[in-house]
Image: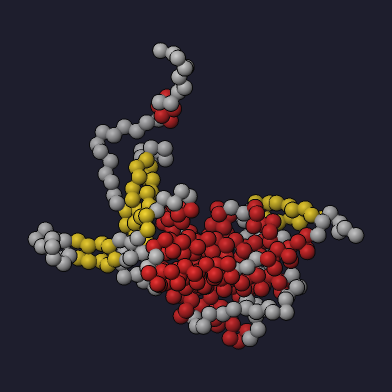
Amino acid sequence: MMAAFAQYPFMVADRPFCVWGWDLEKENLDFIDSLDPKYFESLRSTLKTQIDEDGNQHAAVALRMMYSQALETFFAVLFAAFQAPHQLAAWLVKYQPGDVRKLIRLVNNGSSFVSNVLLEAVSWKDLCRTVHSSAANQQKVRPMVETGIAPMWERYAIDYLNEDLNREFNSIKHGLRVRPGGFCFQIWGPDANKDGPPTLDLGSSDFGTKYPSPQGLSGTNFNFLLQNQHVNWSPENLSVGLEGLVMSIHNVLSFLQVELGHPGPDLVFKLPDSQEDCMEPWKPLQAPSTMVEDRRIPDGCEVLSKEEIRARFEPRVKGGN
């Protein structure tokens, strides 16, 4: 006998939706069971091996892209678990990156959001405590959550809101408009030997990217300069960060199975080896993290209006004078 046609209203950040179906509970459990964060771990391991063996720049850029993809996946699954635990797939097909950013900012500010899971308060510690509340050996888990995993989630939130990281990620996935490789920052003083060591050396990185970034002119975004943005990063930091994201996604899915009353026989919550490991993805680089090639606008530059731009491309009649 077919299940009754049913509804499930839910919110994505502050946007209302309602999904309909015949067996929403089974569909939800099947979907949760199909989510596999080991996808990220498999790619992380493969790419890291290529980087370690010969410094493969393409593998490094792929690892960088994978980090941002896993970052968004984690926050999307986390907020879906709180806002629509009974229809995770419905939340995930309707959310937009702006919804995730809005929810992250609410948690950062300790502001409430619509949740179908009871929260004592709104903070990364409270979300983290709730997710790990069903883990065995709470005496060991609680300190790790409060001083290790929750601060790690907070740092992930900073990364997700970082505009430089977002521009770089978009430059990789949209049109592959990046050049692999890091940069160095060195200065020679006016009296220094240009063939000798620099007067000031702020370090360098073999890994990073360069990509064009638009700078609007005269308060418009359709008149703009393209400036080269340089970014340095460490594949090692990205690799460790991905491990933490895989662990976190896994634990959110374990939490959901418990919350929905369907814990599997192999249910487990994973923990880092130490609290210090949680901060490993953000070890300082021995080099500047970012630099922009500043390009000065010539004096007397007059920008075009949209009408003036369109006028350049007005259609002409074939065969006309």
What is the x, y in percent for residue 121? 61, 69
Q: How is the image coloured?
A: secondary structure
| Residue occupying image coordinates x 32% and y 53% | 292
What is the x, y in percent for residue 73? 57, 62
**Residue 25 horizontal side relative to residue 127, left or right:** right
Comparing 66 with 103, the one in front is 66
54 in relation to 191, above or below: below
**Residue 308 horizontal side relative to residue 26, left or right:** left
Comparing 115 with 86, the one in front is 86
**Residue 83 horizontal side relative to residue 59, left or right:** right
66 in relation to 45, above or below: above
Outermost residue toward the left? 191
Q: Can you say which quadrant of the picture contains the C terminus?
A: top left
Q: Can you say which quadrant of the picture contains the N terminus?
A: bottom right
| Residue occupying image coordinates x 60% and y 87% | 139
| Residue occupying image coordinates x 31% and y 70% | 286
| Residue occupying image coordinates x 47% and y 67% | 47
> Is any part of residue 9 visible from this angle?
yes
What is the x, y in percent for residue 228? 33, 50
Outermost residue toward the right? 1
> Is any part of residue 124 visible from this angle?
no
Q: Which quadrant of the structure image shows residue 231?
A: bottom left
What is the x, y in percent for residue 63? 46, 64
What number of labels is visible?
A: 0
Q: Which quadrant of the structure image shows residue 88?
A: bottom right
